[in-house]
Amino acid sequence: MRETRPAPKGFEIKIFNRGKKQMEIEKVYGDGMVKFAYGHPIGRLLGPVIASKLLSNLYGKAQDCAISAKKVPPFIKNFNIPIAQYKKGSRQTNPIETSYASFNEFFIREFQDGQRLFTPNANEMAAFAEARYFAHASMTDQLEIPVKGAMLRAVDLIADPIQAKDFIEGPLMIARLCPVDYHRYHYPDHGHTLRSFPIAGNLHSVNPLALKYRQDIFIKNERRVSILQTENFGKLAYIEVGATCVGKIVQSFDESKPFKKGDEKGYFLFGGSTVVLCGEKGKWSPSSDMLANTQKGVETYIQLGDVVAQATHSSAIK
């Protein structure tokens, strides 16, 4: 039986922006709907419908319609999207704000070349998503995730005891992507894919507002797991977690080929989403500022390619 608990009144999502070196309050897209869906008695009754894949797919498909493109300019303005950092959409002759043929095309927009650089140092793990990060040095049965308030175990995240055994008591990072964010995710190091598989599940919101109401979302939502062998950080379990209104998790990289640090791995279509990264015990440690902020229950906002962890054990492929 899942655990639920009420979110506190006036709950705010506090984020430490590493680049700006300041604390910020997150402006939440659709916060009223999240509060209704998870905090209101009627909303909780409708929970199975709200979290269903059918509803999310239908909503996601609506974002492919041409009429959805009308939402892009006001969205950019309302959330202060630095749109000049991104490439234009398929309507190349239009100003960038109206260059996207649909909201989904805007949602999966790409950075302009040179906007994000990946750390070149072999012993530094690159941020695999531009996102809000929680980090833990060791994932144990007693671990409680700030904001979420529930235990996370590798076997629950990966849903396969054999595949999960390499990651028991290993480090953990949770990268939360909001609807306002860049929604492509990348490889944090050089290496190759050992195996990958989907895990069926629901599509609950991954917003901290929802996580305050319901504590089992990361292990109940639909997700895709890739077991990676990397040159400098050992094995990684790279887990893409679906969320409400995420029409699809798209694997854009050919997993039969070796990957390099910074290569695009895939992207999420419309909706806020999460990437969870599990590591082997003793191979690497998340950056100290992330660990310190996590202890305070605060996520760290980190740009794509910046440093998120350091190698603590040589695991190079010979």
Image (spheres, rainbow, N blue to C red):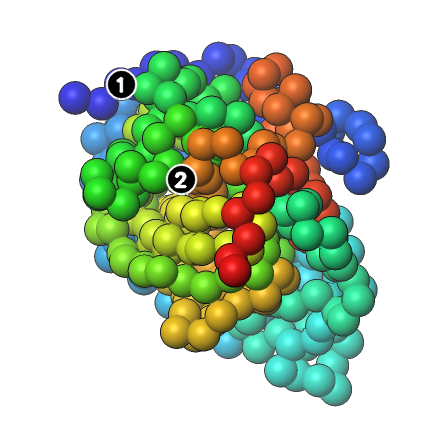
Q: Nearer the viewer, residue 97 or 175?
A: 175
x then y, percent, for residue 87: 71, 72
Q: Nearer the viewer, residue 310 or 96?
A: 310
Residue shown at 27%/23% (left/top)?
A: 41
Residue shown at 40%/39% (left/top)?
A: 205
Q: What amino acid does circle 1 point to? A: Glu
Give the left or right position of residue 200, taking residue 63 as reference.
left
Q: Secondary structure at mark 2?
A: loop
For the N terminus, the quadrant is: top left
Residue bearing the label numbered 2: 205
x then y, percent, for residue 57: 32, 60
x then y, percent, for residue 318: 52, 60
Residue bearing the label numbered 1: 3
For marks 1 and 2, give the one nearer the viewer.
1
Task: Please report whichever mark, 1 or 2, sits nearer to the chain's N-terminal start.
Answer: 1
Q: Secondary structure at mark 1?
A: loop
Q: What amino acid does circle 2 point to? A: Ser
> Is residue 51 at least partly visible in the picture?
no
Instruction: Indicate whether 269 appears above or below 271.
Output: below
Residue shown at 37%/36% (left/top)?
A: 167
| Residue at the outermost left position | 1
- Asked where in the image residue 198 lies, by quadrant, the reply is bottom left
